[in-house]
Amino acid sequence: MFPHFVGEPKGKDILKMRLYELQQAKCLYSGKSLELHRLLEKGYVEVDHALPFSRTWDDSFNNKVLVLANENQNKGNLTPYEWLDGKITVSVGNILLYEYKPAVSLMLKTTHFEP
């Protein structure tokens, strides 16, 4: 089931895989492709709270995105909307918006979304 993992995957490994597949192997902050064989590599990717946990206390799956570690560090404690200063199209790239309603709606700072 997890050909690139050694041994039994941990909960965080499974979460990374779910987000990797949901996001079609793209970092939602940069639009860059994520490499499956590097998901467990320290410092490569991070599961981020799109809306900072320290500000929202939202630890739900819908508030989590898989992003390149350096992009997450650059974003810091900002929402994607604040970090990108409203320039959302750059971060979304060619990802189909209707397939990523939770993550994209967080990035667009809205709760209403139509495909």
Image (cartoon, helix red, strand yellow):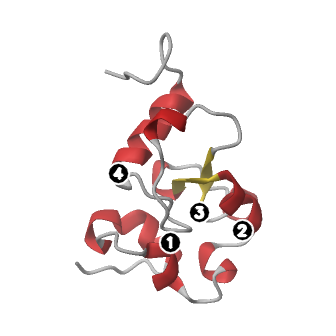
Secondary element at tag 2: helix
Residue that badge 4 annotates: 22
Q: Quadrant of the N terminus?
A: top left
Q: Position of residue 91 (x, y in %)?
A: 51, 75
Q: Earlier in the sequence, mark 4 or mark 1?
A: 4
Other residues around mark 2 within 10 Å, as few (<14) / some (14–19) / many (≥20): some
Q: Residue 30 appears in which quarter of the rendering? A: bottom right
Residue that badge 1 annotates: 106
Secondary element at tag 4: helix
The residue lying furthest to the bottom in this view is 86
Residue that badge 3 annotates: 50
* Residue lying at 52% horizontally and 50% vertically, measured from the top left: 60
Residue that badge 2 annotates: 75
Q: CA distance from mark 2 to mark 3?
A: 10 Å
**24 to the left or right of 89:** left
The answer to whether the residues at label 1 and label 3 have Cβ atoms under 8 Å apart is yes
Q: Position of residue 89 (x, y in %)?
A: 46, 84
* Residue lying at 37% horizontally and 21% vertically, measured from the top left: 3
